[in-house]
Amino acid sequence: MQLVDPRPARPVPIRITPLIDVVFILLVFFMLTSRLLPVSFMELSNSTGNTSPVTGEPIPEITVQREGQAVWRGETYRIEALVAELKASGIDEINLATAPVTRLTDFTSAFSQLSDSGLTAHWKRSPRPAEQP
């Protein structure tokens, strides 16, 4: 025989704030300890040949310089002017090389502008300069 009525079971409230704190700390921990791909490396397809697989004609090579400049046929152009010149010449596929002083941002910007204009740009890997003793 029970003399006292049992208490009605109330659900225990779960506090979300400490859980959010723990998740945030774990997120920061894993972000700081994970290895990220260095910004100076970029994965690009490197299928460059000297001739076009479709027509067999030589593919022009453009060398990207600093500050948005590019060299084609021995002349220096701004990328915007180069796109117009290539379109006027009927060229729709190019090999894109870099000078040793070219920054990654200059290459990425040139590659994006050329690709966005409808040109098929292939990255041509430049040989590394010999290390100086």
Image: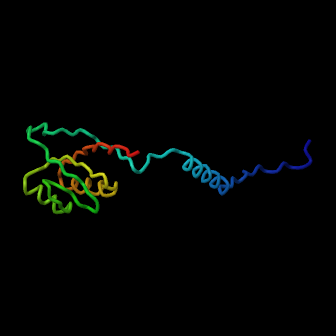
Q: In which quarter of the image is residue 21?
A: bottom right
> Which of these two is toward me, 63 or 128?
128
- View extreme (front): residue: 133
| Nearer to me, 24 or 99 | 99
**Place of residue 55 in the rendered image (x, y in percent of width and height, measured from the top left):** 8, 39
Number of numbered discs visible in the structure rendering = 0
Going 29% across and 42% down the picture, which residue do you hit?
127
Position above or below: 125 against 83: above
In which quadrant is the C terminus drawn? Answer: top left
Residue 13's place in the image compared with 45, above or below, is below
In the image, 123 versus 4, the foreground residue is 123
x then y, percent, for residue 25: 62, 52
x 26%, y 61%: residue: 68
Residue 74 in percent (x, y) is at: 14, 55
Residue ID at (18%, 38%): 49
Side of 75 where 25 appears, left or right: right
Q: Quadrant of the N terminus?
A: top right
Q: Where is residue 47 in the image (x, y as percent from the top left)?
A: 23, 38
